[in-house]
Image (cartoon, helix red, strand yellow):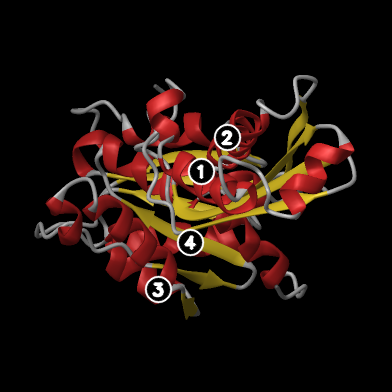
Amino acid sequence: MIDVSPKFNTLRYAKAEGKLFAKPETILQVKNRQVPKGDVLEVVRAAGIAAAKKTTDWIVFCHPIPIDWIEVQVTPGEDHILVTAEVRSVWKTGVEMEALTAVAAALLNAYDMLKPLDSEMKMAEIKLVKKKGGKSSFSESFARPLQTAVLVISDSTYAGKREDKSGKIIQQFLNNQPVTVSVYEILPDDQEKIQKRLKALVDREKMDLIFTTGGTGFGPKDITPEATKVVIEKEAPGIAEAIRKHGKERTPYAMLSREVCGIRGKSLIINLPGSSRGAKESLEALFPGLLHAYPMLWGGGH
């Protein structure tokens, strides 16, 4: 199976459909509810709903999903029965297979109920009609890559006593985003120096996005949030909340992180944890939704 633990929940939706082709006289018996095995329309609908809930029993690499809503519609035509299935869930992966499984199971049940009446039936045109949700639904594109800076805040790393890991992991993650890392620097835990560098990156160097990593804990030298608060003009608490919520679902220590995020001019400054794992998980929580900040900062609204 694919590891989906780094992903975050979004509203997922999928719609699928398929047809069972049969003789017109067979379809007429379905419409008139004269099939010996029972009411095909009701049985098939129920079978589709039940099958969607059992998708992981049949599809080897599917993840068990908490399904929030399933609707199966069975519509007889002149020479076919059309089955449509819709599935909705708030989770980490899509629900396409649940919708397709519902359709396939419904058609199989219809076939089973009608096979004594019609030996020429065939199932066809089973397909995914629509899907929504996941990262692809929240992507943004820009005329130019966002100019980005990564600041590693650590006395020991600045002094050369410890190798930087989190800053390099941040850069590696950003390689797959529509950004260019133009600045990568290591600074000591010095509030005045951090403030001065953040202001210069925004006011003089015109960075669109600035990530700091380190100095967000409870230690006596952890002053990155305090330095950031002085520099920003507007706080963006939802970003920090998303970081901590995502982290807290993975380790209880995330609640001890004091990230501050905010806006200066048209730039976004985001504190990330100093641990390499915490930094990566924070970025996974933020992208791609974070990128929607820029149309708003540039005056485009939602």
**What residue would you read off at disc 4?**
269
Quarter of the rendering occupied by the C terminus: bottom right
Looking at marks 2 and 1 on the same chain, the residue that comes earlier in the sequence is marked by 1
**What residue would you read off at disc 1?**
47
Where residue 247 sits in the image (x, y, percent)? 27, 51
Distance Cα–Cα, label 3 vs label 2: 52 Å
Image height check: is 136 above or below 262? above
Distance Cα–Cα, label 4 vs label 3: 12 Å
Nearest to the eye among marks 3 and 2: give it: 2
Who's the residue at 40% across and 37% down the image?
A: 54
Looking at marks 4 and 1 on the same chain, the residue that comes earlier in the sequence is marked by 1
Distance Cα–Cα, label 2 vs label 1: 7 Å
Query: Relative to the observer, which residue lies in front, 220 or 72?
Result: 72
Q: Mark 4 and 1 residues: CB-CB less than 8 Å, in contact?
A: no
The amino acid pointed to by label 3 is Pro
The amino acid pointed to by label 4 is Ile
Query: Relative to the observer, which residue lies in front, 115 or 75?
Result: 115
Image height check: is 223 above or below 126? below
> Which structural element holds mark 3?
helix
**What residue would you read off at disc 3?**
237
Distance Cα–Cα, label 2 vs label 4: 57 Å
Who's the residue at 35% across and 42% down the image?
A: 281
> Which structural element holds mark 2?
helix
Nearest to the eye among marks 4 and 1: give it: 1
**What residue would you read off at disc 2?**
109
Classify mark 2: residues with Cα within 10 Å, few (<14), some (14-19) or many (20+): some
